[in-house]
Image: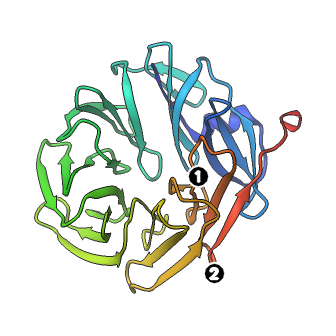
């Protein structure tokens, strides 16, 4: 398997697309990364990007993507130039940072490789085999959840453990230094000062299986596949907004607009996203452009 780091300049150079875009998504049926062209309300899933190898899995965040292939090497793509990286094959799972600048890749032996924006990588021993993960955009901090514990792992080797009253299901960085949101089986938490004892505040009750944060760092969003609804909490004021979802949320992947999130996985027959840019949030269908139009 290989790891492909697809950067904005390379994607747009390949696609030849002009005009606004919402970033990229993974298309499981086509085993391809595709561009989302247009603006919320009129966007379409468009062209798939050429690659030198076959993909089996990918994760996308905004205009970046990380993918696994079958040919065994590890590669990074930067401005249409492929560079082989000294990372082991056999990766299990991928996690991009919110802005797509850093990533974590997990393996069956309980190890993760964390990649910084400059391409440097380090090996990290995880507290559990394949836990929920998050990495910050600098690649300096890794969050790993196991049961009711959240581990904060710094590139220096320092570790801190935060304990919760319910199982930790998902975590996300807010973009503010040392501040993360934590989704548990019982609620959504704001955790500040993660590099130490920290302080925490309950933002909302209810299962938070999927969590993410708008680009501004102020709006924390959570959802659960058990309910056809997504909730956004203003981190500063505590006010909340909700929107009904047409399908059970399987993801909260941030698209390029910053306040737009895909709620369906790459294997879904229909793709849906949530637009939180206005006072009244809305669920929007993302149609697929016909192959002949690509």
Q: Nearer the viewer, residue 194 or 81?
A: 194
Q: Nearer the viewer, residue 206 or 141?
A: 206
Q: Position of residue 169 (x, y in %)?
A: 33, 56
| Mark 2 Cα-neighbour bin, 10 Å: few <14, some 14–19, many ≥20 | few
Dot 1 falls on a residue whose secondary structure is loop
| Res. 20 image quadrant | bottom right
Q: Position of residue 203 (x, y in %)?
A: 34, 77
Left or right of residue 161, residue 205 in this image: right
**What's the residue at 17%, 41% (across, down)?**
127
Residue at the right extreme? Answer: 292
**What's the residue at 48%, 74% (across, down)?**
232
- Work out which quarter of the rendered image holds the C terminus and state it: top right
- Work out which quarter of the rendered image holds the N terminus and state it: top left
Q: How is the image coloured?
A: rainbow
Q: Position of residue 133 (x, y in %)?
A: 32, 47
Which numbered disc flags the more N-terminal residue, 1 or 2?
1
Q: Position of residue 171 (x, y in %)?
A: 33, 57
- When the figure is inspected, residue 101 is found, relative to residue 247, above or below; the finding is above
Left or right of residue 165, residue 2 in this image: right
| Mark 1 Cα-neighbour bin, 10 Å: few <14, some 14–19, many ≥20 | some
Residue placed under numbered mark 2 in the picture = 280
- Between the residue at mark 1 and the residue at mark 2, the CA separation in whole angstroms equals 21 Å
**What's the residue at 58%, 17% (across, down)?**
53
| Res. 156 image quadrant | top left
- When the figure is inspected, residue 242 is found, relative to residue 155, above or below; the finding is below
Left or right of residue 172, residue 159 in this image: left
| Whether label 1 touches label 2, CB < 8 Å | no
Of the numbered discs in the image, which one, if any, rests on residue 264? 1
- When the figure is inspected, residue 61 is found, relative to residue 31, above or below; the finding is below
């Amino acid at each position: 398997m290989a790891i492909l780091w697809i950067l904005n300049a390379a994607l747009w150079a390949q696609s030849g697309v002009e005009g606004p875009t919402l970033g990229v998504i993974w298309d499981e049926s086509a085993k391809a990364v595709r561009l989302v062209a247009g603006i919320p309300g009129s966007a379409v899933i468009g062209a798939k990007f050429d690659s030198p190898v076959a993909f089996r899995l990918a994760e996308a965040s905004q205009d970046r993507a990380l993918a696994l292939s079958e040919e065994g090497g590890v590669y990074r793509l930067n401005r249409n130039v492929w560079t082989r990286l000294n990372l082991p094959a056999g990766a299990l799972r991928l996690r991009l940072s919110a802005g797509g600048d850093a990533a974590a890749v997990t393996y069956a032996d309980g190890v993760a490789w964390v990649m910084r924006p400059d391409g440097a990588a380090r090996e990290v021993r995880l507290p559990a085999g394949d836990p929920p993960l998050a990495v910050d955009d600098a690649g300096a901090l890794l969050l790993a959840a196991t049961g009711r514990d959240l581990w904060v792992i710094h590139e220096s080797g320092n570790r801190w453990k935060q304990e919760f009253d319910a199982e930790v299901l998902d975590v996300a960085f807010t973009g503010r230094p040392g501040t993360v949101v934590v989704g548990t089986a019982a609620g959504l938490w704001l955790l500040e000062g993660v590099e130490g004892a920290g302080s925490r505040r309950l933002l909302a009750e209810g299962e938070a299986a999927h969590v993410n944060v708008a680009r501004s760092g102020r709006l924390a969003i959570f959802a659960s596949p058990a309910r056809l609804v997504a909730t956004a909490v203003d981190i500063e004021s505590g006010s909340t907004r909700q929107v009904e979802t047409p399908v059970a949320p399987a993801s909260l992947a941030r698209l390029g607009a910053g306040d737009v999130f895909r709620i369906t996985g790459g294997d879904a027959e229909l793709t849906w996203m949530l637009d939180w840019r206005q006072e009244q949030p809305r669920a929007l269908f993302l149609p697929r452009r016909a192959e002949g139009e690509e």
